[in-house]
Amino acid sequence: MSSSPTSHTARAGVPPIDALLRLVGPDRLSSYGLPSHDRAYAVQLYLWNLELSSAIFRDIAIGEVVIRNACHDQLTARCLSTIGTPEWYEHLPLSDRDQREVAQAKVRITRARRVVTPGRIVAELTLGFWRYLHSARHESTLWTPSLRHAYPFMSPQHRADVASRLDDLNLLRNRIAHHEPIHALEIGDSNLDVVGVHGELLEVLNWIDPAVSNWLKSWSRVPTVLATRPKD
């Protein structure tokens, strides 16, 4: 039985341009050069953007776990030494916003019929939560006594330098999670594109542990994907 031309080209790796244009929609594809560029280029750039998003997202996923665990370890150590309990999120001076996120994390854990533990709380908290723990309001309450120790290879240690990078990473992460274009993106007020923000991720990890940062840099698919960007 012979196959239709559309199914054959799709199996051969050629995207069904008409179908994608119709189903993805002109509003979304306007970010990829339509109508000023040809349709095939717009679709190829759209698909390449997905590849880049995937490559960056897996690096951010690793970075997010490393960052939150490094911070969690230091907050736990402080709470154990001052209060004698590891539940820092119950006793350290968090903002109302932070406390709401912790409460929501507890609800999600309970609804899943699991016991609330520090490790499960940490796993439920968003990257945005950890970014806010590095905000100026926590300079004397969390950064100076605790969080700065999560970055032993940072010199000099400035809270604002970590906060700005976590803010950029959180913005990029959320944009990818909502399937937004990142191929020509300037992140927040940073004047950086995705390559620059990816570099910030490696920088923050280097402040935590250079070995982890160097490994992620060698493992990352981001440089390879960047080299395959469709030609305009």
Image: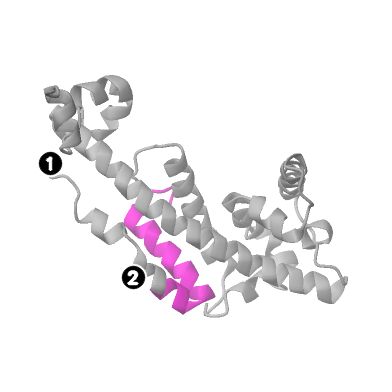
Assess whether residue 60 is covered by the magenta stretch: no
Which residue is found at the position 47% from the left and 53% from the top? 168
Q: Secondary structure at mark 2?
A: helix
For residue 114, side relative to residue 190 (left or right): right
Q: Is residue 144 above or below residue 190?
A: below
Which residue is labeled 2 in the image? 218
Where residue 13 appears, as percent x and y from the top left, is 18, 39
Which residue is found at the position 76% from the left and 41% from the top? 107
Q: Foreground: 110 or 50?
A: 110
Q: CA distance from mark 1 to mark 2?
A: 29 Å
Q: Is residue 181 above or below residue 199?
A: above
Closer mark to the observer between disc 1 and disc 2: 2
- Quarter of the image holding residue 5? top left
- Which stretch is magenta? 187-214
For residue 227, side relative to residue 75 (left or right): left
Q: Residue furthest top?
A: 22
Which residue is labeled 1 in the image? 232
